[in-house]
């Protein structure tokens, strides 16, 4: 399929460090890669990163030698040193029994929002959960049990619809409107009746950051109709430099906050989703109590041994790493969007997901994922997984080390519809 050589391991996972591309001239001039963005710390974003032998779900999708998996939203970059050091310290103490929730963790979350987003989060709103955001959302839906349909934008993260089906809840899809600057939320009044509105902000799959006015308007509409607005903001801390992220519970008018919930996690932000944890911001005390009781019914209590260790280390000490990561992601985004041109449906303003028009890449819309895999050795997510509005699209994850970014750009030249950039002259 490709001429790249990947080391085979006995657990069937591929070795990322063996990706080869044409000689890389070094970090992109705008990248700040590997430098810690002025911190003097090299976080290793521009060197190969080997995930062989780790049981990586993402690399299990690379079901043939030489494939670069870019479908699952999981970074192929080394995580924060502070998290690794905190886990090592904690595991040296050989008591791994039940733990209580550290209430200081709530203040830590509130402090993070104030420092990172300028958002005034009350520590009392915070629930510290030993499960991922997906589980938290399922239990939240079980808690409120809306009888009217749950509204879901499309294209949108497919987990929303899957969770509604699993919970036996009626749901209705709302087509997003494409525009020159990316998708827009549906204009005018939304369908009634509605029991809840689920939103990812930043938007998954396009990386659009929904503007403050739109989020405030949705909160007002939800409150007027007695519907719960749930904003999944797991990519919110990955908003690129020069852009800001509106936190739903603080963006909403105070009169409407009782029907707004924000879900977030350090998992996507700090590349530690394999240790499931999340936090929910629930301003309404009655809903917060009912939500906590529902979680307890599933054996999920606030706290968690490793979960708290990871959360606290990330939020206390992870800022230099995150700043360097965002510089790396923004530079990689620019390299790819410059290369792919009009095939990019929306230039992302957050996270590490690129939403592409298959037809503009010269790929058959109905079989684009397979065609990209066969022609370029790049594995992507099928746009149809994001609802009817995603048909004919592909989602690529570009959270990759510098050498693999270079290999990806090389492989994209195999798409005949892309005009090949000139090679730099030999020195």
Image (cartoon, grey):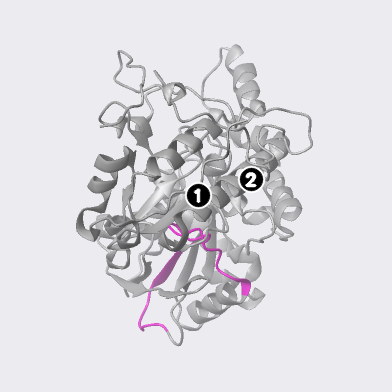
Q: What segment is highlighted magenta in the picture? A: 190-212
Asked whether the viewer can see residue 315, the reply is no
Q: 96 or 69, which is in the foreground?
A: 69
Image spot of residue 243 (x, y percent) = 66, 61
Image spot of residue 361 (x, y percent) = 34, 56
The quadrant of the picture occupied by the C terminus is top right
Q: Secondary structure at mark 2?
A: helix
Judged from this view, the residue extending furthest toward the left is 366
The quadrant of the picture occupied by the N terminus is top left
Residue at (60%, 12%) from the top-left corner?
92
Image spot of residue 100 (x, y percent) = 58, 33
Judged from this view, the residue extending furthest toward the bottom is 188
Q: 1 or 10, which is in the foreground?
A: 1
Residue at (72%, 52%) from the top-left corner?
116
Instruction: Judge from the rendering whether residue 343 lies leftward or rightward of residue 425; answer left or right.
Output: left
Image spot of residue 33 (x, y percent) = 65, 36
Q: 207 or 147, which is in the foreground?
A: 207
Task: Judge the density around disc 1: few (<14), some (14-19), many (≥20) Cα neighbours within 10 Å.
Answer: some
Residue topped by disc 1: 336
As displayed, is residue 200 above or below residue 224?
A: above
Task: Judge the density around disc 2: few (<14), some (14-19), many (≥20) Cα neighbours within 10 Å.
Answer: many
Q: Secondary structure at mark 1?
A: helix
Asked whether the viewer can see residue 226, the reply is yes
Question: Depth-wise, is mark 1 or mark 2 nearer the camera?
Answer: 1
């Amino acid at each position: 399929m490709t001429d790249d050589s990947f080391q085979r391991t006995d657990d069937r996972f591929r070795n990322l460090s063996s990706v080869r591309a044409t000689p890389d001239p070094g970090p992109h001039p705008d990248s700040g890669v590997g430098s810690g963005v002025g911190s003097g710390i090299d976080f290793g974003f521009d060197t190969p990163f080997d995930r062989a032998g780790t049981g990586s779900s993402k690399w299990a999708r690379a079901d043939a030698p030489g494939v670069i998996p870019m479908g699952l939203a999981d970074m192929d970059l080394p995580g924060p040193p502070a998290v690794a050091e905190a886990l090592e310290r904690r595991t040296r103490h050989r008591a791994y029994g039940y733990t209580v929730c550290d209430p200081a963790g709530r203040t830590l979350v509130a402090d993070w929002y104030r420092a990172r987003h300028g958002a005034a989060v009350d520590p009392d709103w915070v629930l510290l959960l030993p499960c991922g955001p997906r589980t938290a959302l399922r239990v939240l839906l079980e808690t409120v049990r809306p009888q009217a349909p749950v509204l879901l934008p499309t294209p949108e993260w497919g987990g929303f619809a899957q969770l509604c089906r699993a919970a036996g809840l009626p749901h209705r899809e709302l087509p997003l409107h494409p525009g020159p600057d990316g998708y827009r939320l549906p204009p005018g009044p939304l369908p009634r009746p509605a029991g809840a509105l689920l939103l990812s902000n930043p938007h998954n799959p396009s990386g659009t950051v929904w503007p403050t006015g739109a989020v405030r308007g949705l909160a007002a509409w939800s409150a007027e109709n007695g519907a719960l607005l749930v904003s999944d903001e797991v990519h919110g801390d990955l908003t690129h430099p020069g852009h800001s992220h509106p936190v739903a519970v603080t963006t909403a008018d105070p009169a409407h906050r009782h029907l707004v919930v924000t879900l977030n996690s350090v998992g996507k932000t700090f590349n530690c989703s394999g240790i499931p944890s999340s936090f929910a911001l629930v301003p309404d005390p009655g809903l917060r109590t009912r939500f906590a009781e529902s979680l307890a019914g599933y054996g999920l209590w606030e706290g968690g041994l490793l979960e708290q260790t990871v959360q606290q280390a990330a939020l206390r000490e992870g800022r230099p790493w995150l700043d360097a990561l965002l510089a790396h992601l923004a530079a990689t985004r620019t390299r790819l969007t410059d290369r792919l041109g009009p095939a990019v449906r929306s230039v992302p303003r957050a996270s590490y997901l690129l939403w592409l028009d298959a037809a503009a890449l010269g790929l058959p819309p109905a079989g684009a994922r397979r065609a990209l895999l066969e022609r370029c050795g790049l594995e992507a997510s099928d746009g149809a997984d994001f609802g009817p509005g995603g048909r004919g699209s592909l989602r690529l994850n570009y959270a990759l080390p510098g050498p693999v970014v270079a290999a990806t750009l090389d492989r994209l030249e195999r798409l005949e519809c892309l005009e090949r950039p000139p090679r730099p002259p030999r020195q």
